Amino acid sequence: MNHPRKGRHDRAKASAGKSKQSWTTILLMVVVGIVGVTVLFVSPDALRRKNQRSPGSTEASPQTPAPISSPGTSAVAPAAGAPMLSTNLGGLSDAEKAAYYQNAGSQLLESGRFADAIAQYRTAVALAPEDEDAHYNLALALAKGGDPAGAQKEYLEALRIYPDYPEAHNNLGNLLLSQGKLADAEGHFRAALQATPDDPSVQNNLGHVLAREGKLNEAIPAFLEALRLKPDYVEAHYNLGSAYLIQNRLEDATNEFTTILRVQPDFEPAIRGLAKARQLQSR
């Protein structure tokens, strides 16, 4: 979830194409004593994103307002790859200026210029303090810039303004998960699902945190729902196989890992999971 955010009234149309993942998604270890298995549960696309340029945060993409144009406003390109900066914003309202600075911030964020993006988003927040998207985008930039406390504050501010903001709930859940605040993370993933129950990545996130909490009987249905919504969801197949492995459901675990390897033969976690399942079956 890392693309510029559209206005509140455009959210329903925009949400269908959004990916609700986080650029800081991590691999988290669960050590289980029942069968002596060490298992990795994976946040959405965590492994895939290691080999791709991520479009955003542990999270959704920045939310980009529509481009602003105004009579008499000229634009110059200060440097290659930098956003187009207007030399005259005097004819615009504060809301239009805020949208302009959010656009500039989103371009900077996409190019990896986190400190510059933060500055643009802070200007947008100052101009439109009740714009939830400005706070959301600032949170994304702060998270990418290595300020999780600042990011958490801005996600909470976005949620104060718009309590049903699913991307903010999801991203905040990932942030809290990375800090080991499992119960709080679970609450935000559940809140995200209230708004977007058909989002497979949020279902996978919920299963992930439930597995971390040792609630495998609740995690497995979440992974299954993620796969119902997106049958080729590799990370959900892997997480489901890992949960089965912990429960000593070795045939089910083998089926999940094998399903992955049919389409991604080099997916190392599944290779290791399948080897472990077969080792336990041979005992």
Image: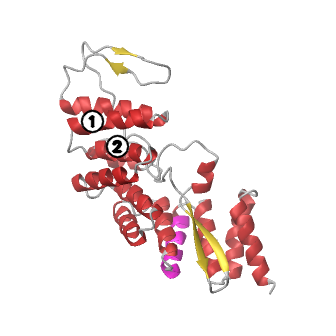
249 or 97: nearer the viewer: 97
Seen from the viewer's position, the closer of residues 138 and 71 is 138
Q: Residue at x 70, y 65 (%)?
A: 270
Q: Is residue 203 above or below residue 106?
A: below
Crowding at dot 2, Cα within 10 Å, few <14 / some 14-19 / many 20+, comes out as many
Which of the numbered marks, if any, corresponds to residue 138?
2
* Residue assigned mark 1: 124
What residue lies at 37% left-to-right and 34% top-to-bottom? 105
Q: Nearer the viewer, residue 29 or 89?
A: 29
Identify which amino acid the numbered label 1 is placed on.
Ala
Say what secondary structure mark 1 lies in: helix
Q: Residues within 10 Å of mark 1 (few under 14, many from 20)?
A: many
Quadrant location, the C terminus = bottom right
Residue 225 in sight in this render: no
Circles 2 and 1 in contact, beta carbons < 8 Å: yes
Image x and y of residue 282, in percent:
81, 84
Drawn side of residue 157 relative to residue 283, left or right: left
Magenta stretch, residue numbers: 216-228
Residue 255: x percent and y percent?
A: 70, 73
- Which image quarter: residue 278? bottom right
Give the image location of residue 233, x and y in percent.
Answer: 59, 60
Q: Earlier in the sequence, mark 2 or mark 1?
A: 1
Q: Is residue 57 above or below residue 181?
A: above
Q: Would residue 225 be counted in the magenta stretch?
A: yes
Quarter-wise, where is residue 238 in the image? Answer: bottom right
Which amino acid, mark 2? Leu
Q: Quadrant of residue 86?
A: top left
- Give the residue drawn at x 76%, y 58%: 265
Is residue 92 among what the camera can see?
Answer: yes
